[in-house]
Amino acid sequence: MNETQRYRARLLEGQWFAALPGELQQALLEAAQVQRLQAGQRLFRRGDKPSGLYAVVEGAMRVGAVGENGKEALLTLVEPPYWFGEISLFDGQPRTHDAFAEGDTTLLLVGQPRLAALLERQPQYWRDFALLMSHKLRLAFVALEEISLLPAPPRLARRLLLIAENYGEGEPREVIHLAQEQLALMLAISRQTTNQILKDLQAQGILRLTYGVIEILDMPRLRLAAR
């Protein structure tokens, strides 16, 4: 299996790409450029001009914002076969967040001019990209609701489930490579509170904690904890 075939197989694991018309799948793959980042390398920063649509095929990307005081607000940590960057495709406005490679990461970039030309020729494909954006909008509304209404323990359990399911883009996985500090940033709760909730879940046999890794041992019970 060559590199292109390997990336295609990885992307087909995601619900959005797998549901696309075959012609659109092929067009995206043909237009894509491989981009490799080292751990910690910046892909783009808030306010940068739009560059196109990205897909994570290896590694992981950290998406959030860093304030002037250096404090980070981490929105999400995304892994293959996640696509991102579609907001600027619609409005042509600058990037809304910062994106950094969590580790050595490989992306596919479909550049903005190539996307614009494709949609000019085939305007029916706008709906497919709208579905990608609307899925994330739903998740954002759910997250806002949870911050307002849920105590920290079920909110943390729900976020673990969401990450394990790769935000609806893949089959559930049992091992999450995520530091507790990062999880705390996502949920806007303290590191100490995050650690205590995780230890409680571990004591119940729902998950196992090791350095930088959260292993889910009992998915049904984690779902119960998320209610």
Image: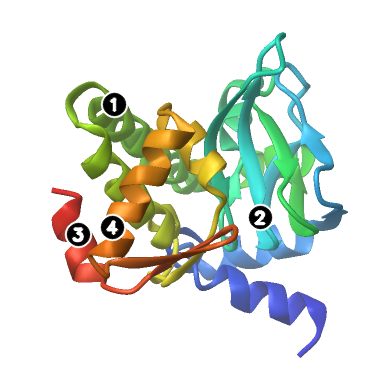
The residue depicted at 30 percent of the width and 29 percent of the height is: 141
Q: Earlier in the sequence, mark 2 or mark 3?
A: 2
Tell me the residue at 77%/58% (across/down). 105
At numbered mark 2, what does the secondary structure look like: helix, strand or loop?
Answer: loop
Q: For the residues marked 2 and 1, what is the alpha-carbon distance in whole angstroms?
A: 25 Å
Quadrant location of the N terminus? bottom right
Look at label 4 and name its amino acid.
Leu
Q: CA distance from mark 4 to mark 1?
A: 20 Å
> Which tag is nearer the camera, tag 4 or tag 1?
4
Position in image of residue 60 (x %, y %): 66, 55
Q: Amino acid at mark 1?
A: Ile
Q: Which residue is mark 4?
A: 201
Closer to the chain start, of discs 2 and 4, is 2
Residue 91 lies in what quarter of the image? top right
Q: Which residue is mark 1?
A: 147
Query: Pointer 2: what residue?
Result: 60
